[in-house]
Amino acid sequence: MIDKTIDRSLRWLDDRLGIAKGGRTFLDKIFPDHWSFMLGEIALYSFVVLLATGVFVSLYYIPSAHEIVYHGSYIPLRGQRVSEAYASSVGLSFDVKSGLLMRQAHHWAANIFLGSIAVHMARVFFTGAFRKPREFNWIVGVSMLILGIVNGFLGYSLPDDLVSGTGIRIAYSIIESIPLVGSYLGTFLFGGNYPGNGIIIPRFYILHVLIVPLLIIGLLAAHLGLLVKQKHTQFGGKGKTEHNVVGTPMFPTFIAKTTGFLFMTTAVLFLLGGLAQINPIWQFGQYQPYQISYAVQPDWYMGWLDGALRIMPSWEWVGWGHTIALEVFLPAVIFPGLIFNIFIVWPFIESRHTKDLAYHNLLDRPRDRPLRTAVGVAMLTLLFMVFFASSDDVLANFFQVPLVAVLWFFRIAVVIAPVIAAVVAYKICNEMRAAEGVGKRKRPQIVTRSSTGEYSTTDAEPRPGDGVEELDAIPVPTYIDLVPPELATGVGVRRVMR
Amino acid sequence: MSDDAPRLEGPLPPAALDDPHLQPYAKHPERAQAVAAVAMVVGFLGFIGFGVAYWVGDSAQWEAVTLGGGLLALGFGVTAWGKYLMPQGPFEEERHEFHSTEAEREAMTAAVTERGGMVLRRRKLLGGLFALGSTAMGIVLLFPLLRSLGPKPGNTLFETNWTKNSQLVTVDGRPIHVDDLAVGGVLTVFPRGYTGSSQDQVILIRLAQLGPLDPPLVINPPGRTDWGVQGYVAYSKMCTHLGCPVGLYQEQTQQLVCPCHQSIFNVLSGAIPEFGPAPRPLPQLPLTADSAGNLRSQSGFNQAVGPGFWERP
């Protein structure tokens, strides 16, 4: 009965949209299995949570610098003059049911969105998944990373609390540092010299809730569309070639697993949102341009930029009646620009270096590409070093060492550590390649002691579940025969006695 | 998707129900089913719990535990169903190279170069004019996009509201008497009428003594020896690095520290930057006391305050 209804509905749709052919292919789409392929899914599902919780918080947030007297339920703030943006953010946290949960889940989702993108990107890099024909998707991904960082900054700037206001102040000064046009860009964007005429909050708001998300959604559609068109990469192994994809089909196996994963990712974000406090703006208070607190730090994904600003020597260039604030412009504009450009052109640098123009659907093991791995490790080390440098004051306090020493440590480490890390990574890769049987899946070893006291080891029997690995891959069958097995015939049909 | 078309010409061969590719991954499917079922029940209860927590309580913690717990359990159940009980294959699909045949590529190139080239070569004038018009359009459309956003900087980056004889007031607008601050005390001050202004913020310090019997320290750089009064010195509170308020005064070392990027300024010698990324001293505000003993400025700043910018000489 239900089958007939489904058949009728699909025919109705196919008459009008022609969905049967493509739809069937889509349901048969094969997803190779590897834990590292879930990193991108975390990013995707965090983004889903970002959109959902973002819609919720946008219903209560008021993007206005207009000053009002706070009358909400948070007693320490009562009677204070605050901006509507700040009052509505605090109100969202305390006077809207589930508001605190949604706001904090939104913030956590942003942090995990960018974290999973970073790790996903590292996976793609170290396994060479960016190679031909996937260079476009690599660039689309890097673009989403950049937009994600930008939108994260815009988002945590909106509540107009003391910490976020400090961030906006720094952003203004970074814009101001651009030679020739910086002063103009700053006053244009802010409606006057800092803090401007209050227009920056509605401007950040529309960028944060509409313009940047639209760009991200467009790129995300391209990212997934390219992934379907070009199909997944896979690690080598039994029956896996450059010309096939081996795994489980979209329907029903993958869809079940990934739906569960969506739920579990969302679960973690909401658990964090309700149990792990993040950005307690009511403790920071309303932003005032003359106030500041100790240990001012941005969200983690801005840390590497903040760290670069901290360790930069004070090289201001003055001459011919002009000033170039190199101590700001180099670390805050040139440095990230350089890093992102290296990311974007890397696939082309590598293919030029290796003179490799072939299609690549099988992934590399990082150890098999020592040079690429070394470069990636050097880049990660550099970024980690500037990231940790953004906590130099906290580190100095924690380890009870002079701030000056911490700063000099990072100034030197930023140069030296990537080189050391690259050399070590390169050597480890070569060592691993030389070792026999490395990377092979190992069966458990059974150690037996004989009656004479001798020990010997044997491979354990394969577990029944592991047996799946031993089968030859077949195309996804259209029909599943309910006839007795001995009557079923056809290519790819194998009968085993169970 | 259409690139897969050849595979779908006809129905694929059927598979037998007991084909090993269709078998669950679980060794004991009944147990896996039981675990998934329990998880889904827990998930259901979690969502019911969230409903209750929402109506009854007002606790983000309970909402998180119930909603998050429900999502986690239901998600686990579905994942377990997919991983342990659904057909595991391995299944495969062919990849098809996406590039077109050589003939198709040539045809495409020809369409662009020959058809397009034909019209362009024949009508160079029109092509050029269209390019000219489009470029002009692109440039003039930038005007409203950028120029309408806000005013030109003009002199605003150079000016503050400090002038000759401005009265120093606290953020509440209270004037400051020379006796107000204890030695070693600091206060953020503004010119009267401009309290809270970013550009005008000034940090007022009454310099500490080295010992209880020593005179207050005032070591101004040459030419500024009379810029302080009774141990008071005043500097722009805007960091010359990125404009954060230089709010940390370390009395023992006589240093001002910017909490944003840890630039350190020496208070005793004209707030020159001793360490960190700040390139310039904090501009100093010359102080005096009027007949009533209230602090006033001798003049405004002799330079632009805050971070560097292109027009700064």
Image: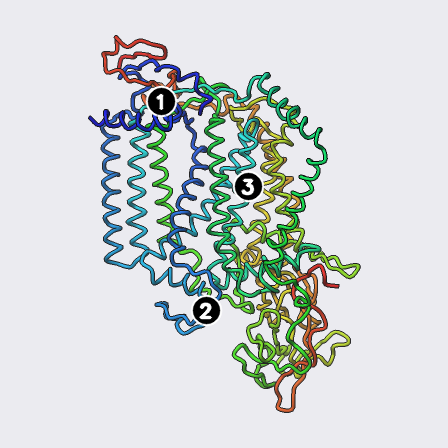
Q: Earlier in the sequence, mark 2 or mark 3?
A: 2
**SS at circle 2:** strand
Q: Residue at x 42, y 26 (%)?
A: A32
- Extreme left residue here? A1
Kindly identify which residue carries mark 2. A82
Q: What is the three-letter code of the residue carrying label 3?
A: Ser
Where is residue B175 drawn, in percent x and y? 57, 84
Q: What is the three-letter code of the residue carrying label 2?
A: Val
Q: Up-down: is A145 above or below A370?
A: below
Kindly identify which residue carries mark 1. A466
Q: Residue at x 61, y 73 (%)?
A: B202
Q: Residue at x 47, y 50 (%)?
A: A210
Q: What is the three-letter code of the residue carrying label 1?
A: Asp
Quarter of the picture containing the C terminus of chain B is bottom right
Mark 2 on the same chain as mark 3 = yes
Determine the image quadrant of residue A79. bottom left
Where is residue A143 drawn, in percent x and y? 55, 41
- Of A467 and A338, nearer the camera is A338
Kindly identify which residue carries mark 3. A143
